Every structure is written in C-alpha cells, then in structure tokens.
C-alpha cells in the first residue's frame, strides 16, 4: 500500500496541550458543536452573544491556540449573536470525549 503525504511545508499543526484541549472542550460543550458541512473538513463552531466582546475575543484566542496554523473566523448571524469557527480534520479525534 502506498500513502501520499503532503510536503512538510503544507502540514498544519494542532496544539494537543491538555490545558488548551480542556478549555476548548468546555467551550464546545457549553455553546459549541462539531460539524462537517462540506465533507472536507470538520468545523468547530461556537455561538456567542455580541454583548460579550471580551468573551468572543477569548474564544477566538482559545481556538487559535488549538489550531495555530489555521484561520479562525467570526460570522455575524444577527445583530445579537455571532458564530466563531475553526476548521481542521484533527478536531474530531482531539475532541473525542
């Protein structure tokens, strides 16, 4: 069997530090979910009320710590709430609890 690996420059890292994982798992259990909307990459999505801008920033930073080589996005759904998302195929295995 042959396995094709991407070149080292294209391999993206995921932080598996237990404290970072515990923080993200707590956030995901409270206000988040995992989905695979496009059948290509798993998405961690956390919803948050816009009246908590510091919490939104903290969630973005926590996801960025978990996925340092990936983009974290904020999508405004209504004037009252936003979705904070990060994509990685490693999320399903990392957050398997």
Image: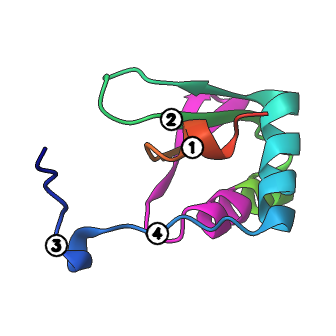
Q: Are marks 3 and 2 in contact (CB under 8 Å)?
A: no
- Tell me the residue that label 4 is attached to: 13
- Tell me the residue that label 2 is attached to: 43
Q: Secondary structure at mark 2?
A: strand
- Tell me the residue that label 3 is attached to: 7
Q: Earlier in the sequence, mark 1 or mark 3?
A: 3
Q: Are marks 3 and 4 in contact (CB under 8 Å)?
A: no
Q: Earlier in the sequence, mark 3 or mark 4?
A: 3
Q: Quadrant of the C terminus?
A: top right
Q: Secondary structure at mark 3?
A: loop
Q: CA distance from mark 3 to mark 4?
A: 13 Å
Residue 73: give x, y in percent of width and height.
50, 50
Q: Are marks 4 and 2 in contact (CB under 8 Å)?
A: no
Q: Is residue 90 visible?
A: yes
- Tell me the residue that label 1 is attached to: 91
**Residue drawn at (53%, 71%), measured in percent from left and top?**
68
Residue 90: give x, y in percent of width and height.
50, 47
Q: Is residue 46 left or right of residue 19?
A: left
């Amino acid at each position: 069997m042959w396995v094709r690996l991407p070149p080292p420059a294209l391999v993206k890292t995921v932080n598996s530090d237990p404290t970072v994982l515990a923080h993200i798992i707590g956030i995901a259990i409270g206000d988040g979910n995992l989905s695979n909307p496009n059948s290509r990459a798993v998405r961690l999505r956390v919803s948050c009320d816009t009246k908590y801008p510091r919490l939104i920033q903290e969630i973005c930073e926590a996801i960025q710590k978990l996925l340092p080589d990936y983009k974290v996005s904020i999508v405004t759904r209504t004037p009252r709430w936003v979705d904070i998302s990060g994509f990685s195929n490693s999320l399903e295995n990392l957050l398997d609890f």
